[in-house]
């Protein structure tokens, strides 16, 4: 166990180096002189003298690997550079907005479970009956809805028509609900099906049959038996997906005007704000790697042959093609 | 062991989710901005004051105003630091800071605000009298020294304004401010109305999260997105502001503006042309539109492939149906133009105009110049080579749609084309690899035309993407630099247009109508609030 | 008699495969049924509601929405195919090599996969697409850069379990070359789960395209593409809902069909896990 931990942690070093390298290379692969971009943020054309000065100031005249080294050195001091656009430290911007996206993903995931656990149970207990078909049909409709479109529809109905929630999330106390609901709406389809599968699986297990044979009531079997056993797998899956969602809420944040880090990331791409872009990608990758490590270690601690492994493996290996 | 750890894991995950749910609910009750930055000491004390004085009717005087981010890019994170170009607009938009002078909304004349008078002592020296009895919101008196300090900071850090002002030195003595420039800066008083030339207290060291100014409102809190809570400045020099509180929302999407107006979250904002009809047909709203001299036009590049041919460029002049574009692409919210300037402007002349739309003339010019459809595909060839033009546009201003429409208009005269939507329009047009480029520009910045004419038409200037060059135009622009007489400046600009239109390197399409929608009942709203060329001196009278 | 004995899951999969094939045929033939020129701009009748002349109404510059939907079908549906194919082939190859050779090769490859998976996929895709410039091909490249890792993990885990099977060790013992074993035993035996994954990937790829189009990184105008049409219509959602509803429904239907198809394929190959592990 100890060796396993050491090995996993040691592997983090080359992985993080590679991640940093790729993040850093993005700026150098992109067309256009960063110094010109740095100066053109007001829409004006910079004069060549200022460009030369900024090139010097940003150290862009140095060889690629020297720049990379300097960037890494700053990184270790917690300095990700200064945003081209706002001229504020990248680290500060990320630190301000990250909790917002974190709150959004957790709330979205919590709502997803609130929606999909009852529906999943309903499907499982009515397997291949009308309720099952109806719910599954709608879950297919739901998962076929582009995220931005779902957000637009929710804004129109819940915001403009019913005036229940603010249409613009930013600057409102209750602003988080619109994007969180959108997120829950798009996610619950898959989760409902997943929970249905998990519970049907549990219901087929021997221990349930034995309980049935002993004459325990169906309701008790379902909640005390099947749901209880399926829960850890479902929650682990939700936990892992939160890690992935942190980087996947960008479009919903944009449509809902939610001031999260995803919106910041996409805007920094549009603005070609490279330090911000690099900082974002690096930080998100770092978080993902660490969360992953933590989950793996917890599971290794629990049992190398954890029975939920297939769920975790499928969550990790599975759908990386996050829909936008 | 195994069961135990699994149990703990489950418990932990449950706990996290419950916390998340609570956090979601919690944010409902305790405000939205966890960002600890933002509250200035002045804001804090002012808040308690007002809360004490106005216990009864805050709702009636609460006004939420929408603040649309300025500039060509989408702004995510706000700063109020005037060193960052254009973002400092926020200080004016929310009413915390003011300028020495403003432009009159109708006449575009320079009006005094924080200064009472400006005189030109000699070519390069200007003397300004700062208004007596004005105080910053922290109680400090406004002196020439304070203005000098603010200007020094802005001109050092903002290269665009630094270049425009070209200051040698600023002297302060009591209420008298003297600005000496290196060269003649003919329109210096107009530059002082520029939104970034704001006056703020430089002693308060946090510039990024709100400035201490002289304006009618005091910033209480600004979150990372630029949403602001403001209270009125009870000691404002023009009088006690009508609204007790302002809330600004930072929205940079016209669709979101529309939704927020409809849902009652904001009291005014501007919307897209196609959405304007929603509000025009709804008597709960009032709609204002105005031609502020912002023009949409095309660059036609004489240095790239087929548009090198003068005849083709001339034919293009006749191929653009401006009226149809205004009606079809911009829902009628624009004024078609064959000139750089709107007809009411002093820079407009009907002596020099671009040709009127005429497909037949365009076809004839092309036929005479030897363009034929030799392979029968419906598109013309020149010397056996099929003519395909590149239309380069960028996403805002509905330009992709405009480009699609242009494409169909070119098809009418037998010219094929492709559309490129550029993410970095300035670079792509500067590179010169385009036939037709779409662009939007304010021709009357600061109520003057030099800031359009110089960068767009001077030889080798920054926005002269077609490398237009005319010695007459260059000479006229040089004269403008040192001439402050408005009549002479207008005369020079009118004369320049002769060579410009003759070159066929630009096609002017329309002046846009800026719009502003407000909920009925909002009064004394300055037009174009938070944007260019806005007279913010009346902001203090806003009420609902 | 035999028909009745057939596994219902197989029947379902066959039906959905037929539906998907029909859809593909439809996408190819659709332009023939277009009532108007999909590129014909008519500024005199912009955003007209559905009528006999224009069954789905007209768009923001007066083009026939039905014609554009029909002519854009192939572009919208088939754009997902190269993404799925590229990521599937590359990912599977890497996964099989990693699993078969094991040891250091496996370790290095899998750590690389870890690294790629760590990137926030949506934003990274947007960043790559923006870097390369808008357009369909660049979107395909951007989506493939990260997408392959799923297949690599999947193929590797298949190979790892197959390696222990007797027929593989038999082939090794009888001195077959690595290449022979890879192509004749491992590939055919691990391909089924890869195909399941791919079948479920198609719908998501179409949705991702819609997302990139929404950000203005998709097809260049004037070519009709459903994601773009949906995006163009978003400003007229209230004033002309038909500009949004029809492309929206078109995407919805196709992605649903793809989802059902993937689900049914999955049910055949993974009968125990039924439904899907797709989130």
Image (cartoon, rainbow, N blue to C red):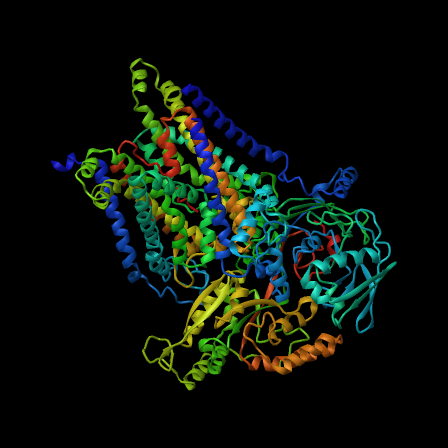
Image coords of residue A246 (percent x, y): 49, 40
Q: How many marks?
A: 0
Q: List the single residue furthest toward the bottom.
A: B368
Q: Residue furthest left?
A: C1
User: Relative to A287, is B187 on the left or the right?
Assistant: right
- Above or below C115: residue A191: above
Say which residue appears at 27% left-offset and 48% top-offset. Answer: C20
Question: Residue A112: in sight, yes or no?
Answer: no
The extreme right residue here reads B174
Q: Quadrant of the N terminus of chain C?
A: top left
Q: Quadrant of the C terminus of chain C?
A: top left
Q: Position of residue A212 (x, y in %)?
A: 31, 17
Horizontal arrangement in the rendering, residue B447 relative to residue B507 (left or right):
right
Above or below, comparing residue A9 to residue A281 in the picture? above
Position of residue B403 relative to residue C268, above or below, is: below
Give coordinates of residue C260: x percent, y percent. 31, 42
- Residue C122 appears anywhere in the view: yes
Of B138 and A124, the residue lying toward us: B138
Rendered view: A86 above or below C60: above
- What percent of the width, then of the height, locates residue C52? 36, 60
Q: Which residue is more in the foreground, B149 or B483? A: B149
Q: Quadrant of residue B112?
A: bottom right
Q: In which quarter of the view is residue B29 placed?
A: top right
């Amino acid at each position: 166990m100890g060796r396993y931990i050491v090995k996993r942690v040691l592997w983090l070093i080359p992985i993080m180096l590679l991640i940093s390298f790729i993040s850093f290379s993005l700026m150098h692969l992109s067309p256009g002189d960063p110094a010109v971009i740095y100066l053109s943020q007001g829409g004006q054309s910079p004069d060549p003298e200022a460009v030369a000065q900024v090139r010097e100031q940003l150290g862009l005249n140095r060889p690629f690997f020297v720049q990379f080294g300097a960037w890494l050195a700053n990184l270790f001091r917690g300095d990700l550079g200064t945003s081209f656009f706002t001229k504020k430290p990248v680290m500060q911007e990320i630190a301000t907005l990250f909790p917002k996206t974190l709150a959004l993903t957790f709330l979205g995931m919590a709502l997803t479970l609130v929606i999909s656990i009852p529906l999943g149970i309903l499907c499982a207990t009515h397997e291949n009956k009308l309720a099952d078909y109806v719910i599954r049909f709608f879950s297919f409709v739901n998962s076929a809805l582009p995220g931005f479109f779902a957000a637009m529809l929710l804004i129109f109905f819940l915001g403009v028509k019913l005036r229940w929630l603010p249409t613009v999330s930013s600057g409102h106390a209750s602003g988080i609900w619109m994007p969180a609901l959108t997120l829950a709406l798009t996610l619950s389809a898959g989760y409902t099906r997943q929970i249905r599968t998990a519970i049907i699986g549990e219901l087929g297990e021997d221990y349930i049959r034995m309980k049935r044979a002993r004459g325990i009531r169906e309701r008790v079997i379902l909640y005390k038996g099947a749901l209880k056993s399926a829960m850890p797998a479902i929650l682990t899956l939700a936990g892992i997906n939160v890690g992935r969602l942190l980087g996947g809420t960008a479009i919903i944040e944009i449509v809902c005007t939610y001031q999260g880090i995803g919106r910041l990331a996409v805007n920094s791409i549009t603005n070609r704000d490279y330090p911000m872009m690099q900082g974002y990608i690096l930080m998100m990758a770092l978080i993902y790697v660490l969360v992953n490590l933590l989950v793996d270690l917890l599971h290794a601690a629990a049992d190398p042959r954890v029975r939920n492994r297939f769920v975790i493996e499928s969550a990790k290996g599975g759908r990386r093609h996050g829909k936008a | 062991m195994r069961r135990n750890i699994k149990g703990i894991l489950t418990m932990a995950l449950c706990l996290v989710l419950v916390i998340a749910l609570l956090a979601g609910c919690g944010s409902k009750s305790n405000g939205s901005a966890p960002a600890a930055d933002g509250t200035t000491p002045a804001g804090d004390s002012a808040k308690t004051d007002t809360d004490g004085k106005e216990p009864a009717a805050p709702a009636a005087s609460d006004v939420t105003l929408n603040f649309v981010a300025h500039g060509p890019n989408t702004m995510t994170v706000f700063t109020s630091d005037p060193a960052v170009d254009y973002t400092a607009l926020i200080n004016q938009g929310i009413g915390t800071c003011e300028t020495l002078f403003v432009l009159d909304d109708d006449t575009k004349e320079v009006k005094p605000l924080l200064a009472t008078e400006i005189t030109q002592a000699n070519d390069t020296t200007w003397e300004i009298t700062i208004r007596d009895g004005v105080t910053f919101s922290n109680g400090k008196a406004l002196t020439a020294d304070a203005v000098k300090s603010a200007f020094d900071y802005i001109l050092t850090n903002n290269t665009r304004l630094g270049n425009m002002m070209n200051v040698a030195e600023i002297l302060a003595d009591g209420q008298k401010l003297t600005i000496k420039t290196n060269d003649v800066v003919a329109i210096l008083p107009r530059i002082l109305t520029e939104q970034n030339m704001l006056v703020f207290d430089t002693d308060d060291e946090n510039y990024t999260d709100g400035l201490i100014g002289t304006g009618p409102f005091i910033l209480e809190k600004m979150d990372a997105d630029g949403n602001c809570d403001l209270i009125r400045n009870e000691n404002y020099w023009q009088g006690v502001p009508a609204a007790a509180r302002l809330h600004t929302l930072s929205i940079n999407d016209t669709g979101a503006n529309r939704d927020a107006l409809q849902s009652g979250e904001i009291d005014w904002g501007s919307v897209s042309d196609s959405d304007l009809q929603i509000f025009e047909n709804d008597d709960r709203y009032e709609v204002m539109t105005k031609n502020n001299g912002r023009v949409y036009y095309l660059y036609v590049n004489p240095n790239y492939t087929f548009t090198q041919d003068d005849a083709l460029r001339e034919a293009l002049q006749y191929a653009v149906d401006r009226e149809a574009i205004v009606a079809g692409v911009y829902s009628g919210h624009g004024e078609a133009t064959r000139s750089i300037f709107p007809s009411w402007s002093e820079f407009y002349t009907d002596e020099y105009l671009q040709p009127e739309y005429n497909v037949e003339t365009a076809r004839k010019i092309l036929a005479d110049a030897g363009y034929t459809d030799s392979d029968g595909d419906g598109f013309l060839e020149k010397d056996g080579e099929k003519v395909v033009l590149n239309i380069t546009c960028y996403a805002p201003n509905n330009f992709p749609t405009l480009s699609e429409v242009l494409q169909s208009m070119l098809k009418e005269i037998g010219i094929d084309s492709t559309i490129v939507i550029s993410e970095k329009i300035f670079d792509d047009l500067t590179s010169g690899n385009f036939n037709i480029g779409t662009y939007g520009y304010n021709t009357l910045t600061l109520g003057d035309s030099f800031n359009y004419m110089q960068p767009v038409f001077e030889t080798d200037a920054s926005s002269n993407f077609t490398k237009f060059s005319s010695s007459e135009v260059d000479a006229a622009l040089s004269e403008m630099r040192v001439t402050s007489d408005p009549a002479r400046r207008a005369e020079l600009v009118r004369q320049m247009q002769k060579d410009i239109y003759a070159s066929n390197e630009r096609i002017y399409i329309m002046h846009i109508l800026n719009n502003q929608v407000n909920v009925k009942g909002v009064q004394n709203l300055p037009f174009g609030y938070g944007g260019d060329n806005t007279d913010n001196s009346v902001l203090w009278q806003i009420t609902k | 008699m035999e028909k009745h004995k057939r596994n219902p899951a197989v029947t379902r999969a066959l039906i959905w495969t037929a539906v998907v094939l029909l859809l593909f045929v439809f996408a190819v033939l659709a332009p023939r049924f277009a009532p108007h020129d999909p590129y014909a701009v008519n500024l005199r009748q912009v955003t007209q509601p559905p009528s006999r002349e224009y069954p789905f109404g007209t768009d923001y510059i007066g083009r026939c929405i039905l014609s554009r939907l029909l002519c854009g079908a192939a572009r919208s549906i088939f754009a997902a195919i190269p993404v799925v194919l590229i990521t599937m082939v590359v990912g599977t190859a890497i996964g099989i090599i990693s699993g078969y050779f094991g040891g250091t090769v496996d370790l290095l490859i899998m750590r690389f996969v870890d690294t790629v998976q760590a990137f926030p996929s949506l934003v990274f895709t947007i960043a790559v697409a923006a870097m390369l410039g808008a357009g369909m091909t660049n979107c395909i490249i951007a989506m493939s850069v990260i997408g392959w890792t799923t297949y690599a993990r999947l193929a590797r885990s298949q190979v790892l379990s197959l390696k222990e099977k007797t027929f593989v060790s038999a082939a090794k013992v009888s001195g077959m070359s690595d290449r022979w074993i890879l192509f004749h035993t491992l590939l055919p035996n691990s391909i089924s789960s890869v195909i399941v994954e791919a079948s479920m990937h198609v719908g998501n790829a179409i949705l991702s395209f819609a997302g990139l189009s929404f950000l203005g990184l998709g097809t260049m105008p004037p070519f009709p593409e459903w994601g773009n049409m949906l995006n163009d219509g978003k400003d007229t959602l209230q004033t002309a809902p038909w500009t949004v509803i029809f492309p929206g429904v078109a995407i919805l239907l196709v992605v649903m069909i793809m989802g059902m198809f993937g689900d049914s394929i999955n049910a055949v190959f993974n009968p125990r896990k039924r439904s899907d592990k797709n989130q």
